[in-house]
Image (spheres, rainbow, N blue to C red):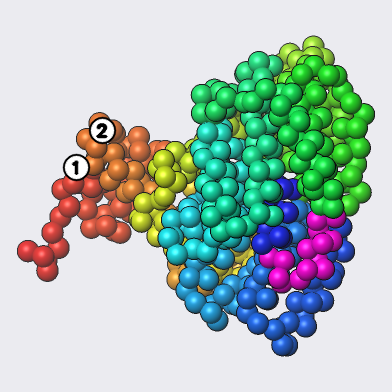
Amino acid sequence: MQISLALSVVRCRAGCPASTDLILRGQLSEAVKVGTQRLNRLQISGGAMERALLGQMLGRTLIALGREQEAQEILQEMRKVYDTVSKQWVRWFASLDQGWTFLGQNRAGRAIECFRSVIDDPDVPADIAIETLNCMADALHSLGESRRGMICIEAALERCYRAGLSEIAELVDCHRLELLVMQAARQSNELSDHVLATSYRERADSVPDPSSLRRELVEREQSLECAELVTQRLHHLQLMLTCLAGGGTSPKFTEVLAWLKERRLAGLESNARIDSAMALLAANSPRAASEALGTLVHTEAQTRQSRYAMDLHYCMSKLYQVQGQMNDSIRAYKQHVEQAVYVIRRDYSQAATLSSSLSPSPASSETAETADAARLRLPLKYRCAYQFIVENITDNALSVKHVAAHAGVTERSLQLAFRAHLGMTPAEFIRKRRMECIRGELQSTGSIGAKVSVLDVAARWGVRNRSTLAQNYRQIYAETPFETLHGKTRMTGSEK
């Protein structure tokens, strides 16, 4: 995310040039202080565009610092600014802001939903489209869709050249090099048992010769000397290439990670540690990989709750195997597979629905916008409850009690918040969401004549009881799931 952050703040430079320069030099905490002071002044006498750009810059910077709650508060305030200008601003900026939040949470599928609504708009300004395409590439790559990620990068570069945005084009090209190095690491034979290994091999373009790739990285690093945030990442990528080429474990790897740690860039540091560990495992250097992971791996329970659980369990499995702890290795690998299945069910379907032109269907875009709008109606501390429901809707054990515990609130306060702001209780929202998902799958499979079982579809969305399905579905749609599947929609009395 280092290069993506640099690209975003360059786009937002007009909001606060001083903060932009600090961020590019890697002084993010100082940039937040300067930017916050300026934002307070702009609230008294400042234009909407200036405030919006500065708010976006601060939000993304706080995500990089791992201060996500503060980031969400600022970005929510910016939505009010967007509302004062136009619906287009709300659609473009709010969707991009939300996508950034999901990227920081390693929720690639949800990020893709947000980015699609921006990319699909023919009226979106070039610089906003370029940032969105750049972020979309990150999300797609994390799901193994490297080829589509590179298509996004190429589209972003083309828009840069058409709009004459040379500085941003240079950063997009750095991002292209970054994805190529990441792609090379994920295609390593040593990582062939990773659940997404096949995707990285089959859904990727050929990687350039490592020596030419390294030369390009060095050239870019030299041309961007004043942007230490980016040059540190480019240097990190060079070290990863060295590992993949069998160059052993360089002590400078530790220096790169220490640079992030010293600046308290928690969000960026986590990504960099996992990238380093994967490259070192690909180079068959497990001890160095364990050191690179550092504090990311604690107890198994903490690892399971991590947003990087899929890759962390994979790394742990490899490390246990080297140590001869085969039972622990098998257990960690099973957890890796379980997490991967969860990610694929939750996120991969969003990437799979993208057309070759990266345009969403109008229906899916409308659904994503509606869902985001509903979430934003809730008070800040209850939004994580809404998000938890959406991300765990396929779990048939999902309950209001679990949701309240996750959000750190009482069941009663959760009930009151949902009823007051969404017009329904959490339990009603869970039922409604499940029925919507079931209906959508039944309609899509029925339209292509696929043979499916209604109960199998319902079970995939957490509903296993036939009578519960029939009752809830008929109550909302006035027809049975079977009728939806076969296109036999009943006519209401007014239609007869």
Q: Specify whether residue 279 is painted magenta.
A: no
Q: Which residues are magenta?
A: 12-25
Using the rendered image of the protein, determine whether residue 386 is visible from the camera's viewpoint.
no
On the image, the x and y values in percent for residue 331 come to 68, 22
Residue wearing tag 2: 450
Residue wearing tag 1: 486
Displayed quadrant of residue 43: bottom right
Is 138 situated above or below 49? above
Q: Residues within 10 Å of mark 1 (few under 14, many from 20)?
A: some
Q: Residues within 10 Å of mark 2 (few under 14, many from 20)?
A: few
Mark 1 falls on what kind of element?
Answer: loop
Residue shown at the point (85%, 35%) measured from the top left: 294
Q: Specify whether residue 20 is painted magenta.
A: yes
Which residue type does callout 1 highlight? His
Front residue of this view, candidates 284 and 457: 284
Is residue 33 found left or right of 81 in the rendered image? right
Displayed quadrant of residue 106: top right
Mark 2 falls on what kind of element?
Answer: loop
Is 408 situated above or below 190? below
Q: Are marks 1 and 2 in contact (CB under 8 Å)?
A: no
User: Going from the N terminus, do you reach mark 1 or mark 2 first?
Assistant: 2
